[in-house]
Image (cartoon, rainbow, N blue to C red):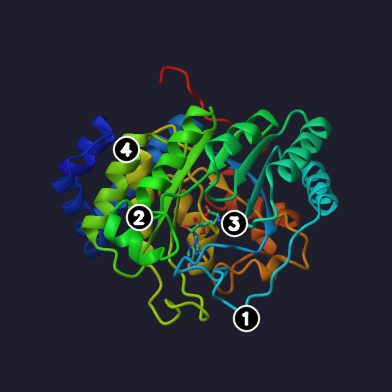
Amino acid sequence: MRELVEQLASSHSLDATSLGTLIDACATDPSVLQHLRDNAVRTARQQFGLGIYIRGLIELSSYCRADCLYCGLRRSNRTAERYRLTKEEVMECCKEGYALGFRTFVLQGGEDGTHSDEWLTELLSHIRSLYPDVAITLSLGERSEESYIRLRRAGANRYLLRHEAANEALYDSLHPSGRGIKHRLACVEALQRADYQVGMGMMIGVKGQTTQHLVEDLKLIERYRPQMVGIGPFLPHHATPLGNEPKGDLALTLAAVAITRLMLPKALIPSTTALATLSPTGRLEGILSGANVVMPNLSPSDVRAKYAIYENKASWGREAAEGLNALESELSTIGYHIDYSRGDYNNQND
Ligand code: SAH
């Protein structure tokens, strides 16, 4: 098994069969997982040193027209509390975030039909004019190619659109209202054409996901070469059809992060909030598996609990923008520190 790790680390690729073997070995043999993670951490340190980039997460809206089986904001969840930030509230978040040192704002939300191109371009232009030196990331789901182009022109630089599941049958089973994985990937391609830095990714341990599915996810990521990759464990939300399903596995999540780091050495990979929610040490374990980004919550405090894609989502203390000191001291326990620069993807020699 060590040879497979060495091969992945040196060639940044593994065939599907070997990937499956490696993933299964990581789930059962802690020494294999450790060897994989050590290699991933070495690669991340070569690229980024001991600095961890931070992104301020602003959750624009909990309204959503989609009905994803796993998500607490799905439209069929009649018990979800819905809110929508005003432009003024978003600008207030940016002001606070900028003062705290954030140089990336991530505007994430449900697929809220009221977020027209006009509304968003006005907001983007405003952020751009006040903060010309920040990166603006959007994570607002599936939109038209024309819309992606307009938002890019208005000042957005990056877009997170996890592919969620490369396997068509699995994708369809999780997204009854969706337009299928082909359409999701067409959106990713439209974003790439529009010259965004693009993020893909998936949950680990969502219902129906097998090792083979994970292999398909990782091979898809290898093929699309996104600049960012978000990977976190599935966490159940009681008011969804998957409310009684088990959480995603920590070891498997760390293995997927580490494999991704070795496949795409320069990718920006967050140690996700879901990982931090799954385990008190999850944040650091993600970094010690090759992750190099943390996304603290910058949403107004009164709406944080309402953006409940899963339950008990960490959004306070080290997960909160105002808790950067706590994050810094947590990172220092493993010798890392916050890197306050914008943290763009380095596309030299690509
Ligand atoms: N509406 C946007 C943003 C979704 S929220 C979009 O469609 O892209 C960001 C990510 O949270 C999702 O892509 C999904 O992978 C993850 N997520 C949603 N529900 C989750 C759950 N129950 N457990 C863990 N992660 C979840």
Label 2 element class: loop
- The residue indicated by pointer 3 is 111
- Which residue is depicted at the point 50% across and 37% down? 198
Tag 4's secondary structure? Answer: helix
Q: Between label 3 and label 2, give the one nearer the viewer.
A: 3
Amino acid type at image mark 4: Glu
Q: Which residue is mark 1?
A: 79
Distance between mark 3 and mark 2 Cα atoms:
18 Å
- Report how far apart the C-alphas of labels 2 and 4 lie in the structure: 14 Å
Q: Which secondary structure, mark 1?
A: loop
Marked residue nearer the N-terminal end (2 or 4): 2
Q: Nearer the viewer, residue 203 or 55?
A: 203
Does the numbered disc 2 mark a residue whose Cβ is under 8 Å from ligand 1? no
Instruction: Specify whether tag 3 is near ligand 1 (CB below 8 Å).
Output: yes
What type is the residue that disc 2 sits on? Ala
Q: Alpha carbon of mark 1 to alpha carbon of mark 3: how far? A: 18 Å
